[in-house]
Image (cartoon, grey):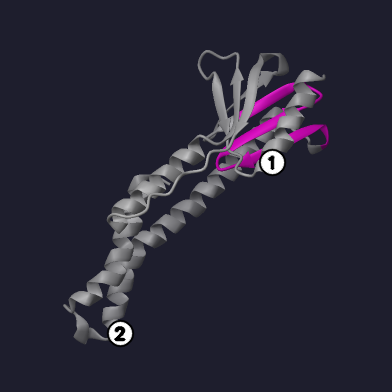
Amino acid sequence: MGQGCLFIIAIGWALLFLLPTLGALKGLGFGYFILFLLIGGTPISLLIWYGINKTAKQKEAHAAMLRAVGFEASKGYDHTEAGTSIVINRSAKTITLMVSGFWKTYQFSDIREWECRSEKAGRIVGGHAIVTATANLQAASEALANSGLFITVKDIEHPKWRISMVNSQTQSRWMEILRQELNEN
């Protein structure tokens, strides 16, 4: 989630909860509640709609990629998370990588190296609450971007891929899959 989305959420919640304290419209009763619910809830509702729509598009892109590469679950491995995917076709000896709807297939011999990384964000304590919260969100976002399965391939245009894998057990499983498929076959 980008900083702009976080800003919209913060403004929505601020309007939802802080404006009533100004006392400007206290005599309106139920209409007052509805007005502030709309003002504060609209940005939040739009972000929820955006998230649902984005997830649907990611699932659609993943399904299209699986169809295009002829993936069959019995002949390989598949992982998708946060708009990224990795598919191994054991019989064709290929690996297909996808990030944000863009995907490409490589032969096993095109894989140079792979590694899993997990980075945890530190916490900033003290200072102004909004500044501290923003700094903590930024640190968490950067840690997430530096975590996952990283694969380097023989490709001038896209030499390094990051596949999102938050769970350490999933990372260990995929490291073993890659060792067996690429090193032992």
Q: Which residue is mark 2?
A: 30
| Quarter where residue 18 is shown | bottom left
Percent x, y of residue 157: 50, 16
Q: Left of 40 or right of it: where is 152?
A: right
Q: In the image, is residue 167 part of the stretch drawn in magenta?
A: no
Q: Which residue is mark 1?
A: 170
Disc 1 residue crowd, few under 14, some 14–19, many 20+, Cα 10 Å:
some
Q: Amino acid at mark 1?
A: Thr
Q: Residue at x 47, y 44 (%)?
A: 121
Most distant residue in the left direction: 24
The boundaries of the magenta stretch are: 74-97
Disc 2 residue crowd, few under 14, some 14–19, many 20+, Cα 10 Å:
few
Magenta region, main secondary structure: strand
Percent x, y of residue 112: 64, 16
Question: Mark 2: which secondary structure?
Answer: helix
Q: In the image, is residue 76 part of the stretch drawn in magenta?
A: yes
Along the line of sight, the residue nearer the viewer: 54 or 1 = 1
Disc sitting over residue 110 in the figure = none
Q: Amino acid at mark 2?
A: Phe
Percent x, y of residue 160: 55, 22
| Quarter where residue 182 is shown | top right
Along the line of sight, the residue nearer the viewer: 172 or 8 = 172
The mark that comes first in sequence, 2 or 1, is 2
Percent x, y of residue 52: 51, 54
Report if the CB atoms under discs 2 and 1 are less than 8 Å apart. Answer: no
Q: Is residue 167 above or below residue 41?
A: above
Location of the C terminus (image quadrant): top right
Q: Is residue 70 visible?
A: no
Along the line of sight, the residue nearer the viewer: 101 or 67 = 101
Q: Is residue 144 above or below residue 180?
A: below
Q: Residue at x 29, y 73 (%)?
A: 36
